[in-house]
Amino acid sequence: MKTVKICLNSIEKVKSFVNDITMFDADFDLVSGRYVIDAKSIMGIFSLDLSKPIDLNIHAQEEMETVLKALEPYIVE
C-alpha cells in the first residue's frame, strides 16, 4: 500500500479522477480525518471536505507505477 496526498478542488477534477482510477482493478481509499471512503465513489468523495488536500491509499502491488503515472495531475507534495 502507498499513501499520497491529492487535491480534488473542483467538480471536473473529481469526475476525471474517478474516471482515471476506475480503469484499475486495485482498491483506493480516500482518508479525511476519521472518514475513510471508497475513492471510486463520486457520492462518497463529495461527502468529504475537498477544500484541502486529502490522503489517497493505493492498494496496488504490480501496477503501482502505472497508477501513480495516471494520478500525477492530482498529486500534491
Image (cartoon, rainbow, N blue to C red):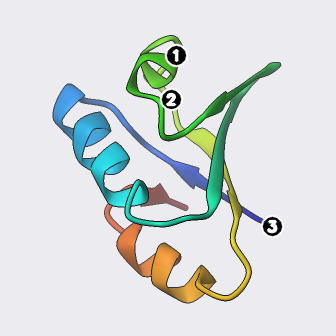
Question: Contact (CB < 8 A) between labels 3 and 2?
Answer: no
Q: CA distance from mark 3 to mark 2?
A: 22 Å
Q: Amino acid at mark 3?
A: Met
Q: Amino acid at mark 2?
A: Lys
Which residue is pictured at 17% across the width and 35% down the height? Answer: 12
Q: Amino acid at mark 1?
A: Asp
Where is residue 1? Give x, y as percent. 80, 67
| 38 to the left or right of 46 | right
The picture quadrant where one finds residue 37 is: top right
Residue indicated by mark 2: 52
| 32 to the left or right of 52 | right
Mark 3 neighbour density, 10 Å: few (under 14) some (14–19) many (20 or more)? few
Instruction: Choose mark 3 or mark 2, whichever is in front.
Output: 3
Q: Quadrant of the C terminus?
A: bottom right
Instruction: Choose mark 2 or mark 1, whichever is in front.
Output: 1
Please tell me whether residue 42 is drawn above or below residue 21 in the rendered image.
above
Which residue is pictured at 48% across the width and 40% down the height? Answer: 40
Q: Nearer the viewer, residue 25 or 9?
A: 25
Query: Which residue lies most toward the front here?
Result: 25
Where is residue 59? Give x, y as percent. 73, 63
Query: Which residue lies most toward the top here?
Result: 47
Residue indicated by mark 3: 1
Mark 1 neighbour density, 10 Å: few (under 14) some (14–19) many (20 or more)? few
| Callout 1 secondary element | loop
| 4 to the left or right of 8 | right
Residue indicated by mark 1: 49
Q: CA distance from mark 1 to mark 3?
A: 23 Å
